[in-house]
Amino acid sequence: MSAPSSPVPAPLGSRVPLAGLAVALGALAFAVLPLLVPTYQVSILTEILIFAVLAMAVDVLAGFTGRTPLCHGAIFGVATYVVVYWSQQGGAPVTGVLLAVAAATLVAAIFGLLAIRTSGVYFLLLTLALGMIVWGVCLRWTSVTGGENGLRGTVRPELLAGHLPFYYAVFAVVGIITCVMWRFVRSPFGLTLRGIRDSESRMRALGYNVSLHLFLAFTISGFFAGLAGALYAMFNDFVSPSTVALSQSVEGLLMAITGGIGTLFGAFIGAAAIIGLENFVSQYTERWQSVLGLMFILIMIFAPQGVIGRVRDLLTRRR
Amino acid sequence: MSGLNAFQLLNGLTFAALLFIVASGFTLIFGLLRIVNLAHGALYLLGGYAGYAAAHASGSFLVGVLAAMAAVAVVGLVLDQGLLRFVRGYELRQVLLTLGVAFLLNDLTLVAFGGDTYTVPAPEALRGAVRFWGLFYPKYRLFVLALGVAVFIALWLLINKTRLGALIRAGVDDPEIIAAMGVNIRRVFLLTFMLGAALAGLGGAVGGAFLTLYPSADAEILVFSLAVVIIGGRGSLVGAAVGALIVGMLNTVGQVMFPEFAYFVIFGPMAAILAFRPLGLFGRAV
């Protein structure tokens, strides 16, 4: 959790050998696994990579800036809508992706302008309300968004039509995004954000422009969420109001929390855990939403520092 | 304002009355217990379904409304004592926990009632329309308007004129001192939580008779309630009333003039208010 009272896990970089090894192993697993598993599992892996980007975008705000957002599903979905709409109108996929990321960033900038004035619970509420407005517009603006029925388009270029080529394209893109975000949170700018998370007043007293930093952090985080949304459009070829619904934002946040807030790479573990569970549960029951709600309740009560953080705590206690 | 007539103006007012009933419960819990209950929308929907079931079974609207309030108050009791007690003092964990509860409740009501649309049967006496000032207006909506005003007066009296209200106000200002003075403030908090939940249930049963009940109604009413509280400021009864009026009227104006962007019309004023008063019109810094 981003509440100042909860302990924040030490940044991964401080234990380089072990953490570096874990990251390398994880990357290796994502590189090799798709060659070993059937097609359906490859598409699940693709989904995990895409949603890990969304979870990392959430983590930039929730973990590194101390502002927990509930609108990233909506920003993500705006990009998805733009890509699918563009392809339906016969536009080129590349332009569609560029437009989509620009649109998502713009939406994030507008949301950011409003949201940075608040913090804590108010921030959460305001971003929730803003995200719901996107959902409401997507649901009602039938002439453009297709309303409840959503939009369908063929977004993927010919070259990436197959499951494996598409997976490796996503793998490469997500790899680059991850490196960029890793650099970003460790940059002086990222350190300033952590300073704001820990004490806003102190950073202000030190002469930092806190509002500007928060605004930029929000917009950049929205940019990454938009990238994830554009990838998702290519993955799914379809978009409906449920893509921008609150549950999407909630899933993104849950992934970030499960993986451990403020760890960035934890997003991959969180995304794998949630999407894996979703696919597992939906074999037996249609009540995924209940399971999601129940997990949220249980995590908040028993492991607010994230499942990974919880396991680490238990391990250190035993030692 | 072309296209906006007295009929639509009244629609806005009656919608505002319903919003006030729901949002007053939300703001009460938010203001006193510092709990942002994101399950409030789900409680509204649950109250609507409970009211529908009870009114159908008993044939009486009043029984339906009372059953809805009681059922939702009990759910509030379970929520507060069974779940929220584990995360007391952690604001964000509380919010996210109630969000989980909202998902769970929404899905469970979907299992129980399916995706169909339900309408709580209005009592015989409130069906049909009345004619006044050359208008032909549904009686039931006027009843909702009156109920909204009645709830406002009752809550105002409760908070400003009774001992319980004095305890609530004292609890808002300084829970430690009031506990040290020998008052069981936890019980006051619990009562407030149940009262807030019951108001959501009342809203559900009453609203279910003219807005109909369907699986995503909880999210819609929640976002309206959030807008009301963000505009009005947390914990303020007057703020909730003013916020409900603003949101209700804007929503109606939006629906008449820009049907596809009705949601969006609330957004502009909310942004403007936040830019100048981040705590809402009647909000106080704590």
Image (cartoon, rainbow, N blue to C red):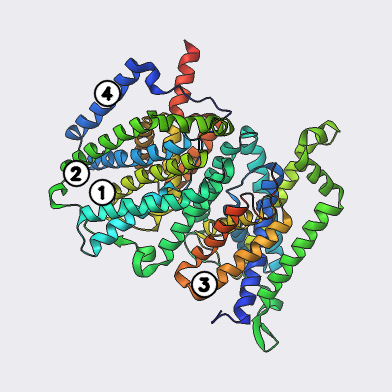
Is residue B208 visible in the rendered image? The answer is no
For marks 1 and 3, give the CA distance.
Answer: 35 Å
Q: Nearer the viewer, mark 3 or mark 2?
A: 3
Foreground of the two, A275 or B257: B257
For marks 4 and 2, give the CA distance.
Answer: 22 Å
Q: Residue furthest top?
A: A319
The amino acid beneath tag 3 is Gln
For marks 4 and 3, give the CA distance.
Answer: 55 Å
Label 1 Cα crowd, 10 Å radius (few <14 / some 14-19 / many 20+): many
In the image, residue A40 above or below residue B215: above
Q: Which residue bears the numbered disc 4?
A: A25
Q: Which residue bears the numbered disc 1?
A: A235
Q: Which mark is residue A166?
A: 2
Return the chain for callout 2: A
For marks 1 and 4, give the CA distance.
Answer: 25 Å
Q: Earlier in the sequence, mark 1 or mark 4?
A: 4
Quadrant of res B241:
bottom right
Do the residues under discs 4 and 2 have CB atoms within 8 angstroms?
no
Return the chain for callout 3: B
Q: Which residue bears the numbered disc 3?
A: B255
- On the rendered structure, is B207 left or right of A295? right
Return the chain for callout 4: A
